[in-house]
Image (spheres, grey):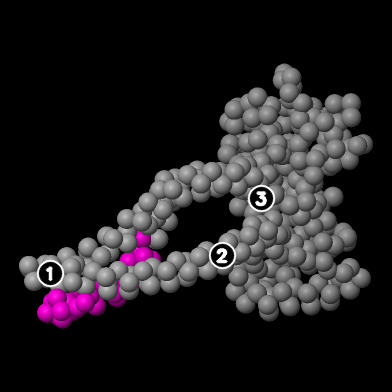
Amino acid sequence: METRLAMTQSTTVTRRKRTVLRLLAVIGLCGFAYEAGLPANIGKFSFVSFAMGQSATLTPELFQITPEFIDLYGIKLAAGRLLSDRRGEDSVINAPDAHNDGHNILINEAAARHLGFTVPGAVGKTIRQGEDFKNSLHIVGVLRDAGFKGARKRVQPTMYINDRKYSNVVSVRLTGRDVQNVIAFVDSTWHRMMPSAAISRTFLDDSFADLYRADVKQGEMFAIFVAIAIAISALGLFGLAAFSAERRTQEIGIRKVFGARTRNVVFLLLWQFSLPVVLANLLAWPLAWYYLQDWLRGFDYRITLSPLYFAAAGLAALLIAWVTVVSHALRVARANPIHALRYE
């Protein structure tokens, strides 16, 4: 299990790095990176860029990061290479008066498609950037699309630049072992080394959970309603099974006299209750498919409704019906046929 903790502060890069390296000495911390803001809050790049030789313009979301960010968040490289602090041209400063001509950047797959390139074909291309398009930025790598804003929003064209100067958030990855003590150590170390800079931290897990909080509550509400509906249905089936078994007592006795086995009688009674359940499912599936399709349209990234989901739901309903009535079926099937024939 890995947990990512984002901390904001406003001290110098050198001092921040020394603090984080100190934190990484503790068991339970296994990586860190700097960025200009929390991933879920990243906004549009302030300067319009366009690809040389292409008519498409690009106003991408901008990640101002350090090279460690890509590995820390598990973003995969689709083509090209990653940025490195060892290459001076891999550093870009996001400022109107910055001279970034000839420097290198990363983009994501969505940006490559927007500019009309294939993913491998975007590597090595140049885009112009800046108010007067005076800076040439070279694309040295294309990253897989990373959905930091949840499944409801499509991943936007994104540009990644190595910009330590304006990176004022540090992301720390925890291994998940002894989290409370690790967090306590992070806080105490931070306050000891930076007493004038208040720490403001948040778990990225919580940020992602907030994106789906309404869906989770809706799921919990539906689960309660489904449980109530199942309980009412089971009670109804139980009473119906008792009534049916009593009404067919003589019939079952005659069947047993003529050689019917216990399993034959049980199967007969179960089938009597299975047929209405199967018919009810066949009526419910089109309605369920319609409303589920409408709900899924709220997500840009969504599953495809497979018939297997509906078949599994129908099988579950059938099993619940069988469990409900099987005790009555067994009791009647095992009864002495002599008593059944005398039943009035």
- Identify the residue shown where x is 71% and y is 74%: 183
**Labels 1 & 2 near each other (Cβ < 8 A):** no
Residue 227, horizontal then vertical, whole percent: 51, 68
Q: Quadrant of the C terminus?
A: bottom left
**Residue flagged by tag 1: what amino acid is it?**
Ile
First in sequence, mark 3 or 2: give its number: 3
Q: Tell me residue 342's x, y (percent).
A: 15, 79
Residue at image mark 1: 254
Q: Is residue 34 above or below residue 176?
A: above
Where disc 1 sits, the SS reads helix
Is residue 337 in the magenta section? yes
Tell me if residue 46 is in the magenta stretch: no
Q: Which mark is residue 225?
A: 2
Question: Residue drawn 66% across and 38% down?
Answer: 108
Range drawn in magenta: 318-344
| Residue at position x 32%, y 66% in the image | 322
Q: Badge 3, how many Cα within 10 Å: few under 14, some, many 20+?
A: some
The mark nearer the N terminus, 1 or 3, is 3
Query: Which of the labelled discs sits on residue 270, or is there none?
Result: none
Is residue 196 in view from this perspective? yes
User: Which sits earlier in the primary sequence, circle 1 or circle 2?
Assistant: 2
